[in-house]
Amino acid sequence: MILQDSRPLLEVRGLCATVNGTPILKGLDFTVKSGEVHAIMGPNGSGKSTFAKVLAGHTAYQVTAGQVLYEGRNLLEMAPEERARAGIFLAFQYPIEIPGVGNSQFLRLAYNTLQAERGKDELDPLEFDDLVREKMGLLEMNPEFLDRSVNEGFSGGEKKRNEILQMALLEPKLAILDETDSGLDIDALRVVSKGVNHLAGKDNGIVLVTHYQRLLNYIVPDYVHVMDGGRIVRTGGSALALELEERGYDWIEAEASAEGTLS
Amino acid sequence: MTTDAVVARGVLENLLAGVLVDQAPAAGATPKLAWLKALRAEAVERVGVLTVPTPRDEAWRFTDISTLTGQSFHPLRTPTSLQAGDIEHFHIEEATTRLVFVDGVHAPQLSSIGADGGVGGVVSNLSAAAPTHASAIQPHLGHHARFRDNLFAALNTAFLHDAALIIVPRETAAAEPVHLLFVSTQPDVASHPRILLVAEAGSAVTLIEDYVALHEGAYFTNSVVEVALGENAKVEHVRVQRESGQAFHIASCAVSLAHASRYHSVSVSLGAKISRLGLDVLQTAEATECTLDGLALIGARQLADTHTFIDHAKPHGVSRQLHKCIVDGAAHAVFNGRVMVRPGAQKTDSAQSSRNLLLSAKAVIDTLPQLEIFADDVKCTHGATVGQLDSEEVFYLRSRGLSEAAARNLLTYAFGAEVIARIPIASLRRRLEQTVLEQTRRQP
C-alpha cells in the first residue's frame, strides 16, 4: 500500500557492483517506503538476483560505487548478520541444504537470535514448537519438515515454503524474495503468496524479484520496476506487469537503449 | 640389522615380556584348551618374525609410529581396583549388559549381564567361556583377523587371555545392545583388548565397542575384533575411540559376512595421539550388505588413520561407505578405503564417499579411495572431497542473523553430526553430538 506519510525504508542511489571483476549493477536507483510492495522484473542476466544478494550482504559481490541507506543507516557497512538483525530478510532463489542441522533447531536458533536483538524473550524448544507449528499451518506445511535436516531432500517447492516459513517467523521489516515463485506449482504459489500477504503491513516493505507476471496475480504490487543491464529502466504500476506479460521485454530494452544513445 | 630395527625389536621384546612365562602349562590347566595355546604359540612365533611397520611400508606410508616404538610400554603389573562409581559416567542407559575391561583385564565386579543372559546366548569373558564353548569359538578366533602378516594382530593374539565373547544364537534378536567398555587407568601400560562376536544364522545384535581413559597419560591399546555373521544375521557395530590425548591406539577389526547377512558400523575416532583402525569386511557369500560409516574428529598434533578394505568376493553384494574427517590444529587424518570386486562378483553395488573438512592452515588430510574391479557387471562409485566450509552455507546462516562464528560452528558441527546421526543408540548419539558440538565450537 502506498501511504502518504510513510518513511523511507530503503534508499539505493547509483549502486554499482561487480562479481569477480565483472560489472553487474551499473548505477541502480531504487526506493522502498514502509507499507509498499515492489516488484522487480526483467530478463535473465539483467542483475535482479545480484541486486537481491547485494542487499543481503553476500560476500561474493563487491560494491564499487553508490550508496544504500536502510532506515537512514549505511547498509553497505553492515555485515550480513547485522542486516538480518536489523530486519532485512532475503528469501533465497536456491535455498542451501545443510545436512546434519535439524530444521527446527535452525529455525529456533535464527528466531532466538532476532528475539535477543529486539530485546524480547527467547523461546525454549516447547514454546517455539507451538509457534512454528502455528506458522506451518498457515503455510500448509507438514510438521515432519521440522525433524529433517535444513532443506535436505526437500523438493523445490518445499524449500521455497521453508523460506517463507522463516520469513513468517522472523517478521522482517524489509523482505526481499528472490524468484521465490519460480518452479512452484499453482498450489505452492498460492500458499507462498498467502505468507507474503500475511506479512505485508504498514510498517513493512516487500521486494519481489520475479521473472514472471504470474506471482503478481496473487500479490498485487504498488510498483513494478523493470531492470535491464544492471539498472532500473522503467517503473510503473501493477498494470506494467501485465503489459510485460503481453509484450515481453524487448520493447523496453529497445526504448532503454534508445534513451541511452540519446543521453 | 639397522639401529632402527634393533630399537624396534627391543620394543617388541618389552611388549612381549610376560607372555612366554604364561605359556608354561599351569597346574590343572584344561587339556581342552590346547588349541588356544597353539594359537597363542603361533602368534608368538609370528611376533618373532615380523617387524614394526615404518613409513617405507605402503600401508603405513602416512602414519609414522616411530614415536610409539620410542616409548617403553609394558604389560600390566599391578591391576587397578576400580569402584562402580569410577566408571558410572561411561554407562549407556540402553545397555544393561556390559563387559568392562580395566587395562585389558576383565573386571567382573564392574560388568553386568542383563536379562536373558544379555543376548539370549553368551556374553562372557573368553577365558571363562572357552572350555565350554570351544566348538563355537574355535572356527572363528584368530581366523578372521589373520595375524600372519600383521604384527599388531599377532601381538594381540600372543597375549590372548581376557577377551569379550558374544555368541548370539540362531534366530535370536538380542533385545538390548551389548556395551564393551575398555578403560585405561595407568600410564605406560600396553593392553590388548580382544573381541569375538559370533552372530549365528538369523540373529540380530547391536555391539558398542568403547575405549576410554581415566587419566591423561601415554599408554598403548592394541585391539583385535572379529565379527562373524551367519546367514541372514544382522549386526550393528558402534565403535567409539575416546582414548587419552597421549595414547597410542592400534586396532584391527575383521568382519566376515555369510549369505544375505547385513553389517553396519559407525566408527568414531576422537582421542589418542596416534590411532589406527584397520577395518576389513569380507563378503564370503552372495547378497550380503555392509555399510561402514566413520568420523575422525581430531586437533592439536593428533594423527588418526583409518584403513578399510571391503572385499566383494561373491555376487550381488552391496556396500556403502561414508567416511568423514574434521581436522583442526596441526593434526593429520588418513583415510585409505579399498574396495575390491573379485572376478565373478557380478551385480556388486558399491558406493564410497570420503569427505574431509580442514579447520586450520596446518591441518593435513591424506585420502585414498581405491577401487579394484575384476568383474564386468557392477555398479561402483567413489569420491573424495577435501575442503573448508562452504561459503554459500555460511552466508545462508549469516543472512538469518547468526554471527559468522556461530554459522561456522554450526556447519562444522553438522558435518560431524551427519555421521553421529547414524548411530542406532539414542543416548550415545546425544552424548557424541554434545562432544562434537564442544570440539567444533570456537569463540567469535
Image (cartoon, helix red, strand yellow):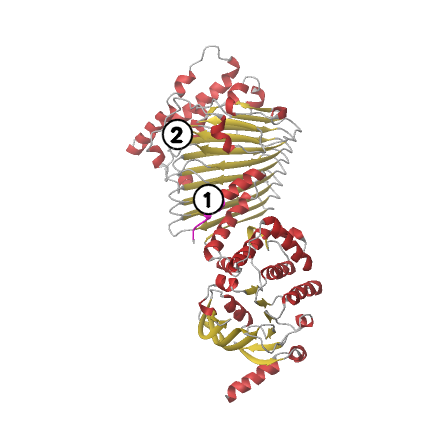
Q: Earlier in the sequence, mark 2 or mark 1?
A: 2
The amino acid sitting under disc 1 is: Leu
Report which residue position mark 1 lands on. B297
Magenta includes B438?
yes
Question: Residues under labels 2 and 1: Cα distance?
Answer: 32 Å
Badge 2 marks a residue whose secondary structure is loop
In the picture provided, is A217 more to the left or to the right than B423?
right
Badge 1 marks a residue whose secondary structure is strand
Q: On the image, which quarter does residue A90 sit in?
A: bottom right
Residue B152 versus residue A35 in the image, above or below: above
Q: On the image, which quarter does residue A192 sit in?
A: bottom right
Outermost residue, left direction?
A: B3
Callout 2: 10 Å neighbours few (<14), some, many (20+)? some
| Tag 2 subunit | B
Looking at the image, which is closer to me, A41 or B334? Answer: A41
Outermost residue, right direction?
A: A187
Looking at the image, which is closer to me, A2 or A100? Answer: A2
Q: Position of residue B411 (x, y in %)?
A: 50, 52
Q: CB of mark 2 within 8 Å of CB of mark 1?
A: no
Report which residue position mark 2 lands on. B50
Outermost residue, bottom direction?
A: A262
Q: Position of residue B373 (x, y in %)?
A: 54, 44
The amino acid sitting under disc 2 is: Leu
- Residue shown at the point (60%, 59%) measured from the top left: A169
Residue A46 seen? no
Magenta includes B89?
no
- Magenta-tinted stretch: B436-443
Looking at the image, which is closer to me, B417 or A122? Answer: A122
Looking at the image, which is closer to me, A117 or B166? Answer: A117
Q: Which mark is residue A133?
A: none
Q: If the image is split into quadrants, where does the N terminus of chain B sit?
A: top left
* Viewer-nearest of discs 2 and 1: 1
